Amino acid sequence: MTQQEKFINQVKEAVDKQPIPPIYNPDEWKGIYFNCYAYAMRMLVDFWEYNYNHIVGPGIISGCIKEPYQFEKENVLQYFKKDCKALGLKVLSTNLEEQISEDEYKIAVYVWEGRDYHFARQDSNGIWSEKNCWRGPIETIELEDITKNKDGYEFIGIFKVSKNVPYFMVLFLYKMNTHYV
């Protein structure tokens, strides 16, 4: 197994272990090297261990990342959605006001066209949080600031994320549940 395959497997395992919606707990993330994308996606993995010290972003899991990284909003959104699919997650466009189910959470996406991206997430307590840069802290965000452009970053949209359970599994689980009632 290659280093890349080990890395992807560890990320998938880490994402599977993290609850949806995520719990706001900055202490859980102490001592590991990660960025805003890893935080929003619940990738509780030390990227430094795998020498991913510069480009950990949309496309890292699905293999879309190409050097040099293309920071256009279309690419960032496409790669984000492909990563979700590779991680067994379903992602749909939403807004701040839409109520989501208890097995979903929201991610806000920002792009500094041609330069960078930024991701934030809504935690189980309803509060939004973000990780600033690689060495920055995890901080909360005021609700009214979520859809604002900030420091060169353009607000792109809000997406709801959930585990992508195949339809046959839904039927199976439904039948199992009714069988035991």
Image (spheres, rainbow, N blue to C red):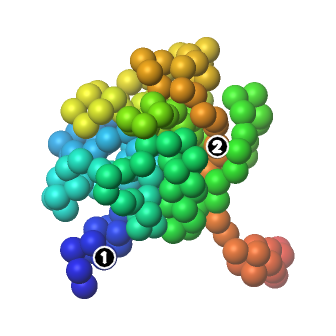
Q: Kindly identify the residue that appears in the image at 45 percent across and 31 percent down.
A: 112
**Is residue 24 visible from the viewing direction of this image?**
no
Q: Kindly identify the residue that appears in the image at 35 percent across and 69 percent down.
A: 8
Percent of width and height locating residue 40: 46, 43
Q: Which residue is mark 1?
A: 5
Q: Earlier in the sequence, mark 2 or mark 1?
A: 1
Q: Which residue is mark 2?
A: 159
Q: Residue furthest bottom?
A: 1
Relative to the observer, which residue lies in front, 155 or 42?
Answer: 155
Q: Is residue 133 left or right of residue 163?
A: left
Quarter residue 124 falls in: top right
Relative to the observer, which residue lies in front, 41 or 14?
Answer: 41
**Is residue 75 visible from the viewing direction of this image?**
yes
Residue type for callout 2: Phe
Mark 2 crowd level (few <14, some 14–19, many ≥20, 10 Å Cα): many
Percent of width and height locating residue 76: 50, 47
Which quadrant holds the C terminus? bottom right
Relative to the observer, which residue lies in front, 40 or 100?
Answer: 40
Q: Kindly identify the residue that appears in the image at 29 percent across and 27 percent down.
A: 137
Q: Is residue 164 left or right of residue 34?
A: right
Q: Kindly identify the residue that appears in the image at 33 percent across and 29 percent down.
A: 132
Q: Are marks 2 and 1 in contact (CB under 8 Å)?
A: no
Percent of width and height locating residue 63: 41, 67
- Examine the rendered structure and indicate whether residue 70 appears above or below residue 171: above
Helix or strand or loop: what does disc 1 sit on? helix
Percent of width and height locating residue 158: 64, 37
- Examine the rendered structure and indicate whether residue 54 appears above or below residue 137: below
Relative to the observer, which residue lies in front, 172 or 80?
Answer: 80
Q: Is residue 53 left or right of residue 78?
A: left
